[in-house]
Image: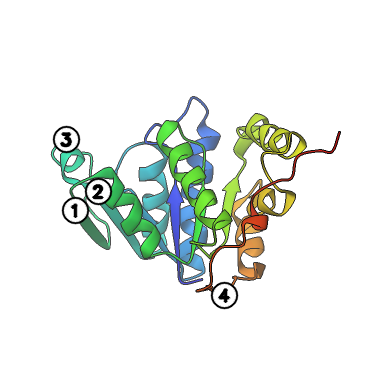
Amino acid sequence: MKSVVVYCGANPGHKPIYREVAYNLGKALAERNIRAIYGGGNLGLMGAVADGVLAQAGAVTGIIPNFLAKLEVAHATLSELHFVDTMHERKAKMVSLSDGVIALPGGYGTLDELFEILAWSQLRIYHGPVGLINVNGFYDHLLLHLDKMVEEGFLRPENRALLLVADTAEVLLEQMEAFLIRPAENKPLDTTLYVTKPEEE
């Protein structure tokens, strides 16, 4: 992988471990010469990721909507900072530049980004690895709910497996490097890839 999108919160969370893991992820990406691509902010876990990359003289690209830039929340010392008009453009631009995706703890925005890219992976629109760092058990309940979706027939096991999970950046990056990137297909989508069959009575 040459570049990875990082989705995470603009808040730091209540425990220091969240910012620590975000900062260490940035360092780990830089040490592997992987460009970090993120939302361009200087606050919370977003700022911590960028600071970690820059501390190791790595490359980090920010994508930020103009309305947020006007609020002076853009990081001032990034390698690159791109301005877009909408949140939709921001998400599309980030993904278009990436070879993989990592999610850290965050709020609604982080979950929106994570589940959109998982849906794209399920539909074979996105072909890179998608990973989640489960800091301090933050995502334990969410992961259990994904298992419930499989159990109730709303998510196929092979699509549940599209989300790679680890407790540390180092382990997750190893999983992502080993991920077999599926070749893009031009043929119509095989709906059996994502549609479950009802149980027979």
The picture quadrant where one finds residue 146 is top right
Asked if the residues shown at circle 1 and circle 4 are in contact, with their CB atoms under 8 angstroms apart, the answer is no
Amino acid of disc 2: Ile
> Residue beneath label 4, please?
183
- Which-is-in-front pick, marks 2 and 3? 2
The residue located at (44%, 46%) in the rendering is 7
> Residue beneath label 1, please?
83
The residue located at (60%, 71%) in the rendering is 182
Say left or right for 145 vs 200. Answer: left
Q: Earlier in the sequence, mark 1 or mark 4?
A: 1
Amino acid of disc 1: Phe
User: What secondary structure is found at the residue carrying circle 1?
Assistant: strand
Task: Looking at the picture, tell me which residue is in the foreground, 17 or 180.
Answer: 180
Amino acid of disc 3: Leu
| Label 3 CA crowd tier, 10 Å (few <14, some 14–19, many 20+) | few
The relative height of residue 64 versus residue 43 in the rendered view (above or below) is below
The C terminus appears in which quarter of the rendering?
A: top right
Q: Earlier in the sequence, mark 1 or mark 3?
A: 3
On the image, the x and y values in percent for residue 29 come to 49, 62
Task: Looking at the picture, tell me which residue is in the foreground, 22 or 182.
Answer: 182
| Label 1 CA crowd tier, 10 Å (few <14, some 14–19, many 20+) | some
Amino acid of disc 4: Pro
- Which-is-in-front pick, marks 1 and 4? 4
> Residue beneath label 2, please?
64
Q: What is the CA distance from the residue labelled 1 to the residue labelled 3?
A: 13 Å
On the image, the x and y values in percent for residue 123 come to 54, 57
Residue 71, which numbered label? 3
- Which-is-in-front pick, marks 4 and 3? 4
User: What secondary structure is found at the residue carrying circle 2?
Assistant: strand
Q: What is the CA distance from the residue labelled 1 to the residue labelled 4?
A: 31 Å
